[in-house]
Image: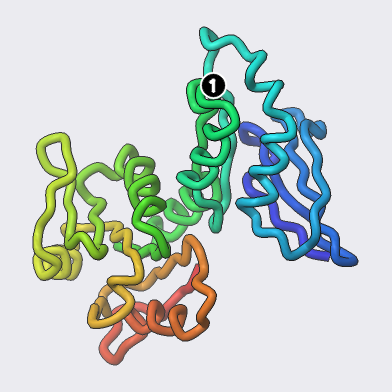
Amino acid sequence: MKNTCNASVGSKGFCFYKATNGIKRHLAVDTLGFPFFTLCTPANVSDDAGLIEMLIRNIDYFRAKPVNIPKITILLDNGYHPDKLSEALESVYPNVMNKIRFELAHFITILRQELATRESAIAFTQYTDTMDFLRETVRQLYGAQVACYSGRGGEMWRDGRWTVVSKEKIKKRFKKGKIKILLCTESASEGLNLQTCGVLINYDMPWNPMRVEQRIGRIDRIGQTYSVRRQ
């Protein structure tokens, strides 16, 4: 039996699933630990698709929620893609994002734990939209110590906005310790040498295992500063 929990029970509530005998049982739990929404799907249904179906089946709950009270916080774990979730939900109920918001529970917890003992971290995702979502959340905690590396080039937070800079500048600032967290797409999985970084976080996993090895190869190299810890 596989049990994936997307946040601690002691936080704002969480969603998880149990997969056994070919069935994945999705369950949303409120802040008191009581079942809120449930859904059963085939075990091969993706996390995104399962959560979308569960929330859409209960969309009337969000329609009935007044807009003048705080948004409902939905905590997400690694592997979920908030941009896809928002797009799917808004296609059914255009005003839904005025009533709910997504937060990254486990990802932020891992970052805080690892950065308590390591100087920097690199996090990979497959999609630029997901990277953009991650950076807004992480920037609120770490400010200008967060940078991005993608097909758009390098990006840094300056004067209240994201500014495009050269990838070479991102690499130099990261190695000097001026950048603490580097958020990347697959553009960084080749040709980027960051031996000074000891923490690699896979926010989501590519279908090709060689892609994962390429990611790991960015920090698991001769001359690395730390023994590598993979999340």
The amino acid pointed to by label 1 is Lys
Q: Nearer the viewer, residue 50 or 160?
A: 50
Task: Give how far across and how far down residue 84 sits, in percent.
Answer: 50, 47
Above or below for 138 versus 184: above
Which residue is located at x 74 percent, y 36 percent?
29
Q: Nearer the viewer, residue 221 or 90?
A: 90
Which corner quadrant holds the N terminus? bottom right
Task: Give how far across and how far down residue 26 sits, in percent.
Answer: 77, 47
Q: Is residue 95 left or right of residue 24?
A: left
Which residue is located at x 57 percent, y 45 percent?
76
Task: Give how far across and how far down residue 11 sits, in percent.
Answer: 62, 35
Dividing the picture into quadrants, the one containing residue 60 is top right
Q: Nearer the viewer, residue 94 or 69?
A: 94
Tag 1 secondary structure: loop
Give the residue pinned by disc 1.
99
Above or below for 132 versus 63: below
Which residue is located at x 49 percent, y 45 percent?
82
User: In this view, which residue lies farthest toward the right?
Assistant: 21
Q: Is residue 169 left or right of residue 54?
A: left
How many C-alpha atoms fall within 10 Å of the one at disc 1: few (<14), some, or many (≥20)?
some
Which residue is located at x 29 percent, y 72 percent?
188
Q: Is residue 162 left or right of residue 132?
A: left
Q: Nearer the viewer, residue 146 or 93?
A: 93
Q: Is residue 212 left or right of residue 179?
A: right
